[in-house]
Amino acid sequence: MVEHYFTAEPASADERSTLTVELAGRPVVVHTAPGVFSAGRLDLGTRVLLRGVPTPPATGHLLDLGCGWGPIALTLALDSPGATVWAVDVNRRALDLLRRTADGLGLANLHVVEPDDVPDDVSFAAIWSNPPIRVGKEALHAMLTRWLDRLDADGEAWLVVQRTLGSDSLADWLRGQGFATSKAASAKGYRVLRVEPRR
C-alpha cells in the first residue's frame, strides 16, 4: 500500500532530522521526518506561494491549511507576531514536528492542531495553503468549502496548485460555489489563486 502524507498516523520509520530553510527572510531550522509532505526540502509549490502572496495581516486569525512540517505557518507566525496563527493538518507526525520547530523558535502565537481542534467561533483574516490535491476531488472540495466559509468578510485565501493537477478547473469550481477567484501569480507550472469570501 502506498502511504500518503495525508495519513493520520504514518507507517514509515519516524527518523527525525533537521533542515535549514529560508522563511520570512531569515534562515530557520525546522524539524522533519519521513511520512510528511516534502520531508527533505521546501517544495516548489510552497516557494511559489510564498513569493506570490502579499504581506499577511498583522492581527487577527491566520490559517495554514494542510500545514505539513510548517513552512507556511512559520512564515505567517514570523511575519505577523501580533496575529494568531493556526496550523492545521490530519498528519499527527507533521503536527508534532511543527510543534517542536515552533517551540524552538519561541513562536507563542502559533497553534498547531488537528482540524476539529480549531474553535468554531474563530474566523480568518487570511488563509494560505498548498492544499493536498492528491487527497481526491471530493475530499478536497469538502475541505476547502469548510475553511473558506470561515473567512472574515474582508479576508482572503491564497492557494497554490500545480497547473497539471487542475489549478484552472479548481478555480472554475470555486467560482461556481460563489467564491470570487482570480489567478494572482504563475510560476514554474504552478498557479497562485486568490479567493474571496463567498457572497
Image (cartoon, rainbow, N blue to C red):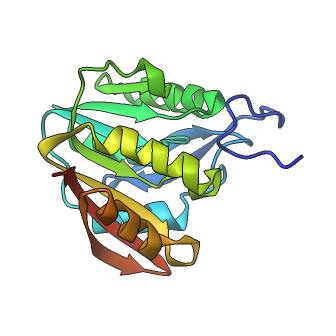
Q: Position of residue 91 (x, y in %)?
A: 62, 33
Residue at 66% in and 49% down: 39
Residue 175 versus residue 143 in the image, above or below: below
Mark yes or no: residue 74 visible: no
Q: Residue at x 29, y 74 (%)?
A: 183
Counting from the top left corner in percent of width and height, residue 158 is at 31, 57
On the rendered structure, is 130 left or right of 184?
A: right
Q: Between residue 155 and residue 58, name the one nearer to us.
A: 155
Q: Residue at x 83, y 37 (%)?
A: 12
Position of residue 184 measured from the top left corner of the image (x, y, whole percent): 26, 73
Q: Is 3 on the left-hand or right-hand side of 143?
A: right
Q: Eyeballing the image, is 163 above or below 46? A: below
Residue 51 picture quarter: bottom left
Using the image, determine if residue 8 lies above or below residue 29.
Answer: above
Residue farthest to the left, as pictured: 154
The residue shown at (47%, 66%) is 161
